[in-house]
Amino acid sequence: MAGKYSKLNRDQVFEFFRRLAEDNPNPEGELDYVNEFTLLVAVVLSAQATDVGVNKATKNLWPVADTPEKMYALGVDGLKQYIKTIGLYNSKAENVIKLCRDLIDKHGSKVPETRAELEALAGVGRKTANVVLNIAFGQPTCAVDTHIFRVSNRTGLAPGKDVLKVELALEKVIPEPFCLHAHHWLILLGRYICKARKPDCMQCKLTDICLYKEKVEA
């Protein structure tokens, strides 16, 4: 199946992920959270913002609002005071409060475990839903952000003209043993090694597999 969705062959794709797994057997996301609800809110807040920036804001938010009821009680204006250092905080505050209301009214204050139900919540798109499904519920989803989109296209792993095409291609090519952690490995690879402006090929363990034409090999 790799040949149709990847420029790498099946053995290369397996080796690609085998090396990532060997280097970091149990990768974790970099957003701070205390439960499924705070994870959902953190991911919503992280849109067009850095994980570091979100963590700085939520460090003081989680102790006072770690449930939908507590967050809803803050109200939009109250929440803004905690997240005003995050980009687009006005609209994000409104979405989070709406999200809390729906969780309370429609889901018994619990975070739903299906993509459709998650995407029906304010401020939650496919990428956010995939992150929550993967981290909170252990589902083998692949949330394609800018890092994964870049890595997938640059290396030839799963080329695509938009994030959905890359996501669907990754679902086809990622070997089953690596499905659960694949998106974490790819995000970390894109964030710290295969960076946007200047990939650090000298520190990459995949240069012999990668198809990037401008790569620098040791």
Image (cartoon, helix red, strand yellow):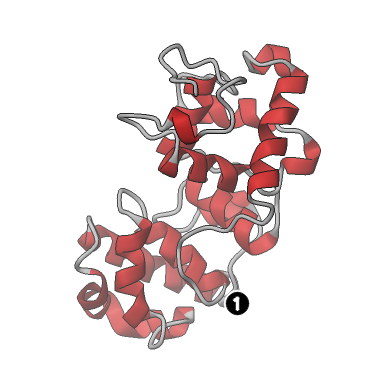
Q: Nearer the viewer, residue 131 or 174?
A: 174
For mark 1, what is the residue?
A: 108
Residue drawn at x 20%, y 77% is 81
Tell me: residue 122, above or below residue 85. above
If the image is split into quadrants, where does the N terminus sit?
top right
Q: Is residue 64 left or right of residue 116?
A: left
- Quadrant for residue 137, please give it: bottom right
Residue 167 position, x and y percent, is 57, 32
- Image position, residue 204 (x, y; %): 52, 33
Name the spot of residue 169 as percent of width and height, x first: 63, 25
Residue 86 % position (x, y): 24, 61
* Residue drawn where x is 70% and y is 25% of the image: 13
Is 171 left, or right, of 66 in this rendering?
right
49 up-or-down from 136: above or below: above
Q: Where 77 sits versus 208, above or below?
A: below
Amino acid of disc 1: Gly
Helix, strand or loop at mark 1? loop
In the rendered view, tell whether residue 89 sits above or below residue 208.
below
**Residue displayed at 72% across by 37% down:** 18
